[in-house]
Amino acid sequence: MTTGTPTDGATGDKAAAPQQDGSEANGTAAAGSVASVDPRLLVRERGFAGYLDDLTRRLRTGELGSLPVIVGLIVIGLVFQLQDSAFLSANNLSNLFVQSAGTGLIAVGIVFVLLLGEIDLSVGSVSGMSAAVLAVLNINQGMNEVLAVILAILVGMAAGALHGFFFAKVGVPAFVVTLAGLLGWNGLMLQILGPSGTINLDDDGVVAQLTNHYFADKIWAIALATVCVLAFLGFSLLDARRRKAADVPSRPLSEIVLRTVVVAIPAYAAALVFNSYKGLPLAVVIFVGVILLGDFVLRRTTYGRQVFAVGGSSEAAARAGISVPMIRITVYAIAGTMAAVGGLFFASQINAANQSSGAGSLLMNCIAAAVIGGTSLFGGRGKTWSALLGALVIQSINSGMALLGTGSAVRDMITGAVLLAAVVIDSISRRTQKTAGRA
Amino acid sequence: MSATPVLALRGVSKRFGAVQALTDVELEVHPGEVVALVGDNGAGKSTLVKAIAGVSPADEGRVEWNGDPVSIDKPHDAQELGIATVYQDLALCDNLDVVGNLFLGNELKSGGILDEVEMERRSRELLSTLSIRIPSVRIPVASLSGGQRQTVAIARSLLGEPRVVILDEPTAALGVEQTAQVLDLVERLRERELGVLLISHNMADVRAVSDRVAVLRLGRNNGTFTVSETSQEEIVSAITGATDNVVTRRNARTAQQASTTEVRK
């Protein structure tokens, strides 16, 4: 199983060729395709030294990306492991991944919204409402479960699109629209759950399987990790060959191998962990699949490019012929869809929809996950992998605190502090980028 | 310079309610020629540019393209003809890289997926033919200087292979060196046989790069001058509408002072 750590953590854009600050020394040594090398130009340099230079340049100019959260995860892991050796056990880690899927899936939607520089406060309520819709349709009305799941997700999508409509077409601030959604959808959920307030789901149903099914055969986890690593290697090689053919800077083979190794280590480590417990969890497969899909949409399609453009400057995007309202409405629809999917995962964990579905700290956890993972609150910068990293941080704190037996009071304080730290890093890196960015 | 102008306006008029913004304006732009459009605030420069760009079409008058009458009713019409407009406030996205900005709205795709390699190749090709030096085509536009950003914005307008480029105040917010970069680029556009319409307040820039200067005053033509044969005072007086104005008086005064100091020596 791959994690987001290596793919883009260091270089931000996979498509970007390794370019580093050609300070005087590098400038002359550079084997760039530029004929006469101006020392101020960023020229690429082959080999690992250039890679390190690139990294330091990015750190200096505030392009931190996912680095702080990876460091944070390691620190959290070490601290809890020292307190209780059960923390890094296969059992605990496997559960931790499965439990982070719900938060993480909702956070994927939040990443899209944050890329626009907006916020969605309604995702918690929408997730609860979707779970309630599913439970009512499937259990109370006796509808086919798969159909009920599809309808529940569509309800979430419609709720998101409605927020987007009021924001994009009517011009109500997104904060207020989704605040109305926070209250309204929660009310609707209580209404449709009826007087009993709790509807238990079918123990063997599709939704129940979401977080309870494991591919027990060890071959699955290893096979998936292998497929991911080989796919990464294959696409990198293909990309490098196309770039070479087109005579634009490409990654040298040594670097592709290095990056593949960096992808392979967490992928196989995760596979080993899962195999030491119950096997590859279905929840993790879906979660990572959604992240890969979202990442592809954001970085490889016109739609994704348009989302980034609107987040960077809606005025410029409109002048370039992009329909800004369409982008806004669809992004909120995506957030609503992901909230609904996440809601089903939470329902799966307790195997029921009840009055507290989507309530409590869920909303803040999802937004915190996206921000902690490295997606900027200011719009235009971020990736779906933030959702995985951030959700892991939050779930690690939850899990570690539960192991240590501390109450929710301490846990909330620590989660709040981590969120604050993430926002501070985001603000400072934005400021550094502004000052360092000016050539 | 060829005989037929690539773009010609004949008797263009535009009215906003009670205000006659443009009256019988004539303008010609030839291939490989830089025409400066100057005039005081409110002279109708922006209105004329909007009419050409199709943002707000003229009420009366003809637009000729290579001698043939055409109608420009919306921005798309102007783009179809081959008129590219670079507005004063740059329409660039800070968070996207140079390649992303150049192709924004016209992304190249292969099989539904963004073709980053081809876009990067064409970006490098375009920037190098224009001799635009930027650190890398893969860094966010936010980290470029004002002049570099302006050159990227101009380069972006060239991707559609236009015949006429309209530059609205391209040097307004730039420093000395950055202004020079942009003016260099304007000259390269001329070398590529493009017609350039340059709107500027800066007389030094106008005289530095343009072949002809078309002066607008109160929405009417107030003379077209060949830069090499015209003094700055003549252009200024055409802009202000009088030979006796602040600029000429100041020039006369400084000339007088200079001669008196000469005498004292």
Image: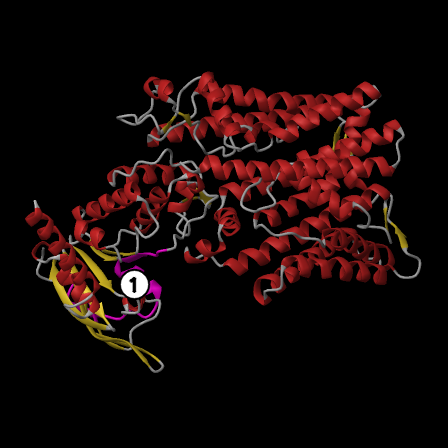
A186 vs B131, left or right, is right
From the viewer's perspective, tell me whether residue A89 is left or right of residue A302: right
- Answer with left or right where residue B116 lies relative to residue A137: left
* Camera sees residue A219: no
Q: Chain of mark 1?
A: B
- Dividing the picture into quarters, in which one does residue A86 lie? top right
Q: How many marks?
A: 1
Above or below residue B144? Residue B186 is below
* Residue depicted at x 28% and y 45%: B179
- B208, above or below A215, in the image: below
Q: In the image, residue A15 lies at what x, y percent?
A: 46, 34
Residue B242, image quadrant: bottom left
**At label 1, which amino acid type do we have?**
Ala
Element carrying mark 1? helix
Q: Which residues are magenta?
A: B63-88
Q: Camera-side residue: B261 or A247?
A: B261
Q: Position of residue A30 (x, y in %)?
A: 35, 20
In the image, residue B79 lies in the stretch drawn in magenta: yes
Can you see residue A110?
A: yes
Residue sitting farthest toward the front? B264
Give the residue at mark 1.
B78
Magenta-span inclusion, residue B133: no
Q: Position of residue A98 (x, y in %)?
A: 76, 35
Relative vertical location of residue A138 with respect to residue A47 in this rendering, above or below: below
Which residue does the image show at 26% across and 61% down from the upper left? B81
Looking at the picture, tell me which residue is in the foreground, B10 or A278.
B10
For the N terminus of chain A, the quadrant is top right
Towards the viewer: B20 or A281? B20
Q: Position of residue A124 (x, y in %)?
A: 75, 51
